[in-house]
Amino acid sequence: MALVPLASVLFALLVGSVSLEPQTLWRIFDGSADELARTLVIDLRLPRALAALTTGGMLALAGCLMQVLLRNPLADPYILGVSGGAAVGALLAISAGLGGFWIGGNAFAGALAVTLIVFVLARKQGGWTPTRLLLVGVVMAAGMGALISLILALGPDSSLRGMLFWLMGDFSFVRQWRGQMALLVLVLAVCLAMARPLNLLTRGEKQATLLGVEVGPLRVIIYLLSSLLTAAAVTTAGSIGFVGLVVPHLVRLIAGSDHRIVLPAAALLGGSLLVVADTLARTVVAPRQLPVGALTALIGVPLFLMLLNTKRGA
């Protein structure tokens, strides 16, 4: 699986409106290539590919955690309204004519605000159940969707295209990836340390409790980690669907349900899938670029239906 992200990044570096030969790529990294090719790869394609790799990994890992938390195979990173809060914050910044740091900062603040609201509203005396959390999250997601529609309707026409591209996912202006990569590695390490309790939790809360798992604190940790990953991913590139839903299913079909394997494999495969989708988004109708979220939906829908049919056949 470790070779798959490497192959996807190489594909992203070589393919584009200006295609490169593999020997050109080698000359770029040993310093003998011309300045134009070096700028194209080092300054433009490589940061974008690594940002897509990191974002896809975060979404896939968040999808795994959400499916364990809610014990629902249809759960994805956006189901509890975190992406909706991020979208509201980002669209408010875009409609106000702000950019760069303000869009990302507002998106992250909106995502964390919704996370806190859902956590507080879903909690009652004695803790909260997955069903209660899911219901509160779905209602918050619907509310955020209504706010997004109002912002799009009332926002200035000059900002409308940028708003729509952000909502559908876009890596055109993403150049920072190191912080997101560090976050992904850190959260993955924490999740691997919790792999055994996660395996037990998937078998049911009562069985996990009988085998010594502190279910309440574990659920809080899972929720916070998945929300943090989702907030970081949405802040980086907007809302990108189906990665967090399809990739965990595909990994479990190939490698089984042991989270010691599922978690790192999902992060690697999710990142690779998004890198390929983003490369196609910027090359299919070059020089125009498509929103990467539309490509992931086109890939994810038939793939999910195929996986569903395979499971039924089994």
Image: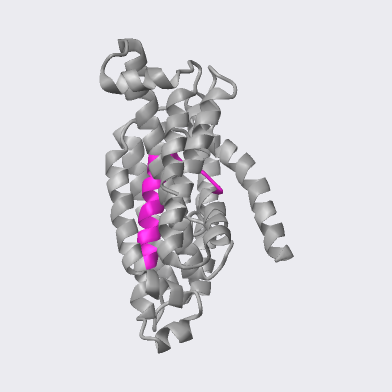
Tell me where residue 3 sits by quadrant. top left
User: Image quadrant for the C terminus?
Assistant: bottom right
Residue 176 on the magenta span: no
Q: Residue furthest bottom?
A: 210
- Of 266 and 183, nearer the camera is 266
Query: Quick check: 245 above or below 278?
Result: below
Q: Is residue 93 above or below residue 263?
A: above
- The quadrant where residue 39 appears: top left
Query: Residue at 39% of width from left, 84% of height from top?
Result: 126
Q: Which stretch did the figure color magenta?
A: 222-242
Q: Is residue 16 above or below residue 62?
A: above
Q: Position of residue 234 (x, y in %)?
A: 42, 45
Q: In the picture provided, is 46 more to the left or to the right than 4?
A: left
Horizontal and vertical percent position of residue 95: 43, 32
Q: Quadrant of residue 172?
A: top left
Say if the magenta span includes residue 237: yes
**Which of these two is toward me, 154 or 268?**
268
State whether residue 65 is above or below residue 60.
Answer: below
In this view of the protein, which residue sits in the foreground, 189 or 112? 189
* Residue 83 % position (x, y): 46, 50
What secondary structure predominates along the stretch shown in magenta? helix
Looking at the rendered structure, the number of numbered marks drawn on it comes to 0
Q: In the displayed image of the protein, which residue is found farthest to the front? A: 23
Residue drawn at the location 39% of the way across and 17% of the way down: 24
Where residue 28 appears, as percent x and y from the top left, is 32, 19
Question: Quick check: can you spot residue 89?
Answer: no
98 vs 150, left or right, is left
